């Protein structure tokens, strides 16, 4: 499983435009093959700090998404940012024996 965290610092006057674009796209992203979740969030400390959080089943699914038209639109919307966006990828695994300590979350 792969967790994608995209951090954005949007220009205040462009926050609504960017938020509407990403919120609309996130509905479609959730339907892509291999997408386990896609959430769009705002910082409680700074309303101009936004986050797109995605979880993908496989690297192949993620790479297909990153080459998709939807992601091209997201990248295009990044012109509304104050600073360059930051994208972090994290590989998540479930070690054997952990199910006794932490129940598996579906």
Image (cartoon, helix red, strand yellow):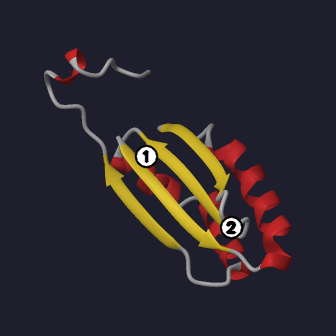
Say whether disc 1 or disc 2 marks the residue closer to the N-terminus: 2
One can see residue 33 in this view: no
Q: Is residue 77 placed above or below 101 in the rendered structure?
A: below
Q: Nearer the viewer, residue 90 or 69?
A: 90
Q: Label 2 belongs to which residue?
A: 46
Horizontal side of 8 relative to 15 (left or right) equals left
Percent from the top left, x then y, of residue 37?
A: 55, 38
Tell me: residue 93, above or below residue 5. Answer: above
Assess disc 2: are there few (<14), some (14-19) or many (≥20) residues with their C-alpha within 10 Å of its C-alpha. few
The quarter of the rendered structure image containing the N terminus is top left
Check residue 105 in the rendering and tell me which mark sits there, or answer none: none
Q: Which mark is in front, 1 or 2? A: 2
The alpha-carbon separation of the residues under discs 1 and 2 comes to 32 Å
Residue 43, percent from left and from top: 64, 59
Determine the image quadrant of residue 104.
top left
Label 1, residues with CA under 10 Å away: few <14, some 14-19, many ≥20: some
SS category of the residue bearing label 2: loop
Residue at figure coordinates x 60%, y 70% from the top left = 8
The single residue placed furthest to the front in the displayed view is 45
Residue at image position (71%, 70%) is 48
Residue 101: x percent and y percent? 23, 20
Is the C terminus in the top left, top right, bottom left or bottom right quadrant? top left
Could you tell me which secondary element the residue under label 1 belongs to? helix
Which of the two residues, 99 or 61, is positioned nearer the viewer here?
99
In this rendered view, identify the residue nearer to me: 24 or 19. Answer: 19
Q: Is residue 102 above or below residue 67?
A: above
Q: Hey, which quadrant is residue 79 in on the image?
A: bottom right
In the picture provided, is 24 more to the left or to the right than 76? right
Up-down relation of residue 12 to residue 63 (above or below): below
The residue under label 1 is 61
């Amino acid at each position: 499983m792969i967790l994608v965290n995209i951090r954005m610092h949007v220009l205040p006057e462009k926050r609504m435009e960017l938020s509407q674009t990403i919120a609309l796209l996130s509905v479609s992203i959730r339907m892509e093959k291999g997408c386990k979740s896609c959430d769009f969030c705002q910082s409680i400390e700074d309303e101009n700090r936004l986050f797109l959080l995605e979880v993908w089943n496989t690297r192949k699914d993620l790479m297909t998404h990153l080459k998709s038209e939807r992601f091209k639109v997201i990248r295009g919307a990044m012109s509304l940012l104050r600073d360059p966006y930051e994208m972090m990828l994290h590989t998540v695994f479930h070690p054997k024996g952990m199910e006794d300590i932490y129940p598996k979350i579906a």
